Amino acid sequence: MRLFKKILDFYIFSNIHVALAGFSLTKITLKNFGTETNLTPLFVAFSIVISYNFIRYYEIKNNRLSWFKDWFFMNIKGILLLIILAILGLAYISFFADFNLKSLLILFPFAFMTFFYVIPLFKIGKLEVSFRNFPMIKIFSIVIAWAGISVFFPLFEANYQFTSVVYLEFFQRILFLLAITIPFDIRDMNADSKSLKTLPQILGINSVKVLGIMLLFGFVLLEIFKENFTYIGFLIVLIISIISGLFLWFSSPKRSR
């Protein structure tokens, strides 16, 4: 049981689960547009392992995440090995696989938003200013970055022409990501500064849950308007929305990390 907990902790705290989420969202985009490659989903997953662990390290070195510090340094060798493997994976995809390096250009604005969500853009005295510190920006910077990386990047790499269909996919992804991010803002409601003006702080917990359900409803509704609409695809989207809606509805500031 202790071994299982150690494995589960490493899976979660080393951001492997986040990398798998990035892989899955990118893969879903490609499958929706009839492309089966795994290169860009793997590229996204490896990039997440590197960037998210770097951000975690930065936060720890700046006296944040005190609850996480001991675990991080106890498992630093495993995390470094994971990062090295991710770097090697990125190098192989970039230089030895059939990968369009020009597609990296479209990643820059979204990578910028990811890094500077936590890392300060600039300092005013002792005050660090990042996307996280701007009112209402916190949730949207995360959502736009993830939507761009999981929709625009793989389709650009596949030389897919950007038409209204692509932008519909992007907007649908934003609705879904906004909805599933709300529980995390609810969880952090008591820890976040009041000046951040997150959605739960502005609307209240019950109202923001209703907003999340409406976003999921919009996510499902947009599936109907897709050119490549299938009943199986619609059913999958509906099931995902119901499960996400349940997690959203029962989320609470009292839940632990």
Image (spheres, rainbow, N blue to C red):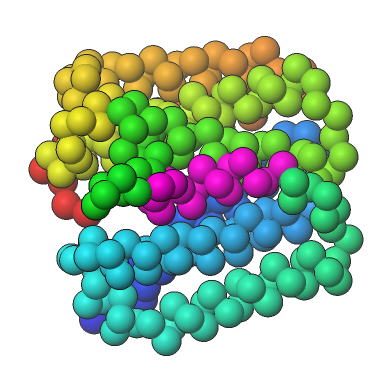
In which quadrant will I find the N terminus?
A: bottom left
Identified at 52% across, 77% down, the residue is 82
Is residue 123 among the parts visible in the rendering? yes
Q: How many marks?
A: 0
Location of residue 99 in the rendering, given as x and y in whole percent from the top left corner:
84, 58
**Which quadrant of the figure has residue 159?**
top right
Is 39 on the left or on the right of 138, as rendered? right
Identified at 68% across, 59% down, the residue is 43
- Frontmost residue, 183 versus 102: 102
14 versus 200 height, above or below? below
169 versus 183 height, above or below? above
178 versus 12 height, above or below? above
> Most extreme residue toward the front, as rendered?
125
- Frontmost residue, 54 versus 131: 131
Identified at 29% across, 84% down, the residue is 74
Is 90 on the left or on the right of 241, as rendered? right
**Which quadrant of the figure has residue 89?**
bottom right
240 versus 96 height, above or below? above
Location of residue 101 in the rendering, given as x and y in whole percent from the top left corner:
82, 55
**What segment carries the magenta color?**
106-122
Is 177 on the left or on the right of 138, as rendered? right
Q: Is residue 103 magenta?
A: no
Is residue 250 among the parts visible in the rendering? no
- Frontmost residue, 242 versus 82: 82
Location of residue 232 in the rendering, given as x and y in whole percent from the top left corner:
64, 29
Is 180 on the left or on the right of 114, as rendered? left
Q: Is residue 110 magenta?
A: yes
